[in-house]
Image: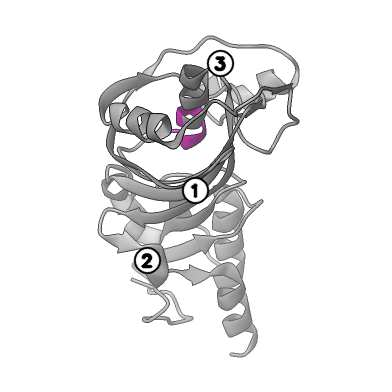
Amino acid sequence: MITRNNFKLDLQDEGEILLIDKPIDWTSFDVVRKIKSIFNIKKAGHAGSIDPKATGLLIVCTGKKTKELRNFMELDKEYIGKFQLGITTPSYDTETEIVEKRDTSNIEETKVKELAKSFIGKRKQFPPIYSAIKYKGKPLYKYARKGRKIEVEPRDIRINEFEITNFDNPYVDFRISCSKGTYIRALVNEFGNILGCGATLLSLRRVRIGNYFVDDAISINELMESKQTE
């Protein structure tokens, strides 16, 4: 496994597992393509995407190790982030423009923390219309950008922990541990709807997948710089 503390430039013929710290405004497939280019390899894949506006741990497998991708996909995830109460966007994050603003002066910290606790457990979640989930062979975000809203079935998810780490109205810092397939920005949108003021995700970082941590991950820039100095 290639990590910050166990780094080598020559990938093994049988494949490798890389812990990557995905930068903001990169898609998960951008990372995979860059790794293919850096190491001049043909076969690579990731074990669960992160939204372009999010950063953090992305597990990438190459060669024969791609057979292990599904095992990593099943693992629980942990995130830290910040959202803002009182604003809403179509994508539930900052990728699209604000479409509505509401007053949040009556929202108290105790109410926010109590609501977060109520999210813990198994629940149904509707994926965002701005997502890579496919409908008739096309990702939903392509329909959304053309103004078409496609109805999709809710998914079963599980929230293990939902901690409010700081509240400075209208800004909320949080930490969430959850099952695979959980859209944090959809969770934030639902949170805001229940409060009656709306909410939008401002920042998100994936810090853990199973027992693998972003602190052990290597950045794309570090990979590129090391390759250039070979």
Q: In this view, does 35 lie to the left or right of 109?
A: right
- In space, the residues marked 3 and 1 are separated at their CA atoms by 33 Å
- Residue at image mark 1: 81
Q: Position of residue 80 (x, y in %)?
A: 44, 51
**Element marked by disc 1:** strand
Characterize the local packing of mark 1: few (<14), some (14-19) or many (20 or more) Cα atoms within 10 angstroms.
some
- Looking at the picture, does residue 172 appear above or below residue 22? above
Residue mark closest to the camera, 1 vs 2: 1
Q: Can residue 153 be seen in this view?
A: yes
- Residue at image mark 2: 15
The type of residue carrying mark 1 is Gly
Residue 186 belongs to magenta span: yes
- Residue at image mark 3: 136
Residue mark closest to the camera, 2 vs 3: 3
Characterize the local packing of mark 2: few (<14), some (14-19) or many (20 or more) Cα atoms within 10 angstroms.
some
Give the residue drawn at x 53%, y 46%: 82
The type of residue carrying mark 3 is Lys
Give the residue drawn at x 54%, y 56%: 32
**Element marked by disc 2:** loop
Residues rendered magenta in the picture? 183-187
Picture quarter with the C terminus: bottom right
- Front one among 196 and 77: 196
Q: In this view, does 68 lie to the left or right of 56?
A: left
